Amino acid sequence: VPSYPTLKDFKKLVSQAIIYETMEDLSQYEAQRLEHIRRNHEMLVRLGLASTIEPKGTVKVGKKTAKRKDKRNVALETEAPTTLRRSGRLKGIKAEYDETFLPDENTSRNNSLTNKRRRVHKLVKEEEADDYETIKKEILLSTTEFLKEVRLKVRQIGGAEGEPDSPDGWKKEAIKRWGKRVHAKSDWKEYVLSRMSNPPPPSPLNLLQEYFCADTWQLLCCVTLMSRVSSWDTKHRCISSFFKEYPTPSAFIDEEDASKVKDVIKSLGLFDDRFASLAAITKAFLLGTDGQTGDKFDVDLKENKIRGIGVFGYQSYGIFCKDIGATVKPNDKTLASFCRWRKGLDE
């Protein structure tokens, strides 16, 4: 006589399988978000706007719980959000089932088992879907609040000492932000101010450009790396890894071994073309474009055209570094969605 699993056994198996699938998917989403947040925190540290000491506590992606960070080790209030999982199911709290899911006494054993499977699977699946979407919304909200703080702080020229009052002070500001390879012809103040980003408020759309638009060079590199790549995971993973290795244009231009860059971004494909574009963007950012006469930096599709920056890159630059999204109608559907959202803030 075959031994059939009980309803209790089946509930447990289905629940475990769906929780595992949901947590794996959520873990990937949360891991990428935390990596982007980490890049932003590293930028604040480089500018002297956050502590160099790592806050206590850990975030273990894929686990049901995470330790809370100790705020005493953070220089400013800006703190990267940690995991926000509050779902009862993901915390290990068993779901409650009522008697409506018990088998009918008049139904055959085989049919009863089939019905149990369908009913339990539907119940658990619906609950997990609700949990998953709720958690993603909470993660996005915490990320948006953190990015608001980052953008405000990054625009604080001079940090606690205030805006520089001499050419040497502006040069030091440029070095602090973009590394020792910066070079101005005569006007360091114009050099710095023209390269500063003026990003829009973070949107609920969670676009990749929004994580890197606080720094103009990073935004231009980001749009070059993300173009012609369909995989969400590949884009996020490679771009975050690139800025981990090369947080400033000086760090990138000092790299003598192109194979190291290839190891980081090879999954994106078209390496030779992307590498040449990254080099052109970095050179133009540090030294100025071919059409530039003074120290003012700008990007367009004519005199100040940079290799690798086409219509998508140029429009992304205007939308995310110049905050003109409320006044333009881009060709790209994702950019158009952001611009509609941005325009709605002004109405």
Image (cartoon, rainbow, N blue to C red):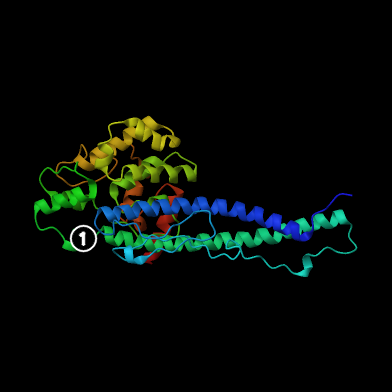
Query: What residue did someone put label 1 on?
Result: 159
Identify the residue at image location x=39%, y=32%: 271
Coordinates of residue 330 in the picture (x, y in percent): 39, 49
| 189 w.r.t. 303: above or below | below
Identify the residue at image location x=78%, y=65%: 101
Coordinates of residue 108 in the picture (x, y in percent): 89, 57
Viewer-nearest residue: 22 or 318: 22
Identify the residue at image location x=64%, y=62%: 127
Say whether residue 304 is visible: no
Coordinates of residue 328 in the picture (x, y in percent): 36, 53
| 310 w.r.t. 191: above or below | above
Q: Regarding mark 1 in the picture, which secondary structure is present there? A: helix
Q: Is residue 193 left or right of residue 17?
A: left
Identify the residue at image location x=37%, y=44%: 223
Residue type (three-letter) at the residue carrying disc 1: Gly
Q: Quadrant of residue 279?
A: top left
Q: Residues within 10 Å of mark 1 (few under 14, many from 20)?
A: some
Q: Quadrant of the C terminus?
A: bottom left
Q: Is residue 76 left or right of residue 332?
A: left
